[in-house]
Amino acid sequence: MLKSNAPLPKNDQKLSLSHVFNTEVRKAMKDFPELDGKFLLIDTENKVVHGKVDPSVARVDQNQLDDIIMKVAEGSERAHSSLATKLDRVNLDVMAYTPLPFKLFTGKDDPGEMEAMAVFDHELGHLVVRGGYYSEDPCFRECAADSFAVLRHIQRYGDKSEAIERAGWRRAFDFVMSGDAGHFTTLAIDEIAHIKDDLDIAAMTPEQTAKLAMRVSLEHTPHPDITEACAASFAPVRKAMQQTRSLETGMALLAEIALANDSAYYTYKIASRVLKPFIEGKVQVPGQTFDGKKWEDIRTRMEDRQKQFDSEGILFGMPTKKKAPDSGKPGDNVVPFKKPAPPRDPRHERFIKRLV
């Protein structure tokens, strides 16, 4: 099961999604013609299979198909998680939907269908984004799927979608708490936040959506050397959490790690992403508080460091050229106009040449 120690909203609403899944499977085959005749969705919660296999496309008879459906469904139920798989030997793409007990992409007050559609789009991303299934880098595969899911969620729900903020935070939190970078997709998800105001996401075609998810993932899947170093940096947090079972203690220690080095770019970037909702008071954990003098001090120091981080970007902690201060007065920072010197007398030119 895809586990998480993050304080996430429960996902315990029993949904009947037959009509929705029927519509979405048909739309997926229309949007991505390479799926037509070879795509199935298994709803393990309601024991329903959606889609229709064309024997001329998928090299499979009914007995084989029944066996495949049973094995994929069992694998998904055993993992307690949705999944997607490509069966090349029979030319078949299969998804299984098994909802997690918590919400990853949406909030506690959002309809359950919004979360289900995000999960559907994540698994679809594995099948239609280039590299989303076959890449040898597991982190790239998940970046591709999450990037596609976030873009599709914005297309579906517009400004109502909080998928970027929620999924990006949860993926960072789980990386810090586990040290496992397999699902660390935050850097790719957050890149979509940076470009979404300049991008007409609603106008993008399905093909463009898949291509952009691939581009974002190629640019922003973290290198294993980075994630291994960061995982080592966050090891004290994991140890403290195991010993105390106190989220407040773990987050306070994470803040100290983030603030300990003024040039640790990735350590700060990841840690600050995790800490943000705690510092802003957006996360409520029963029996634990993020108030008081200690947390006021953390907030102040993190805010100061964040200003530096936002200002310097990738140059965080590097020596930079000093710029002349702007007085704010018109003309004070303008280079004054100098009248060009009159042309020299030719006799002077001859004299200078003799001197040289």
Image: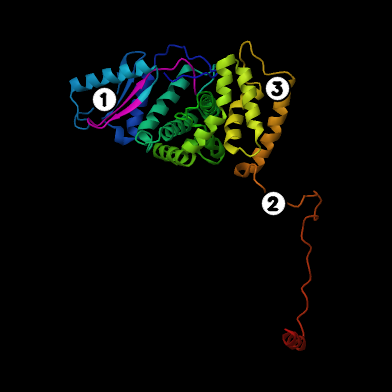
Instruction: Name the element at disc 2.
Output: loop
Q: Which amino acid type corresponds to the residue marked 2 in the rendered image?
A: Lys
Q: Where does residue 290 sit, x and y in percent of width and height? A: 67, 18
Q: Quadrant of residue 196?
A: top right
Q: Quadrant of residue 22?
A: top left
Q: Which amino acid type corresponds to the residue marked 3 in the rendered image?
A: Trp
Magenta range is 84-104
Sequence-wise first label, 1 or 2: 1
Residue depth check, mark 1 versus mark 2: number of the one nearer the observer: 2
Q: Quadrant of residue 165?
A: top right
Residue hosting label 3: 295
Q: Quadrant of the C terminus?
A: bottom right
Sequence-wise first label, 2 or 3: 3
Q: Which amino acid type corresponds to the residue marked 1 in the rendered image?
A: Lys
Which residue is rendered at x = 62% and y = 42% of the image?
A: 313
Residue hosting label 1: 52
Which residue is rendered at x = 73% and y = 23% of the image?
A: 296
Sequence-wise first label, 1 or 3: 1
Instruction: Name the element at disc 1.
Output: loop
**Left or right of 85, for residue 294:** right
Kindly indicate whether the residue at mark 3 contacts the one at mark 1 (C-beta within 8 angstroms): no
Q: How busy is the neighbourhood of tag 1: few (under 14 within 10 Å), some, or many (20 plus)?
A: some
Instruction: Measure the alpha-carbon separation of dots 1 and 3.
Output: 56 Å
Q: Quadrant of the N terminus?
A: top left
Q: Where does residue 253 sit, x and y in percent of width and height? A: 63, 24
Instruction: Name the element at disc 3.
Output: helix
Q: Where does residue 320 sit, x and y in percent of width and height? A: 67, 49
Q: Which mark is residue 321?
A: 2
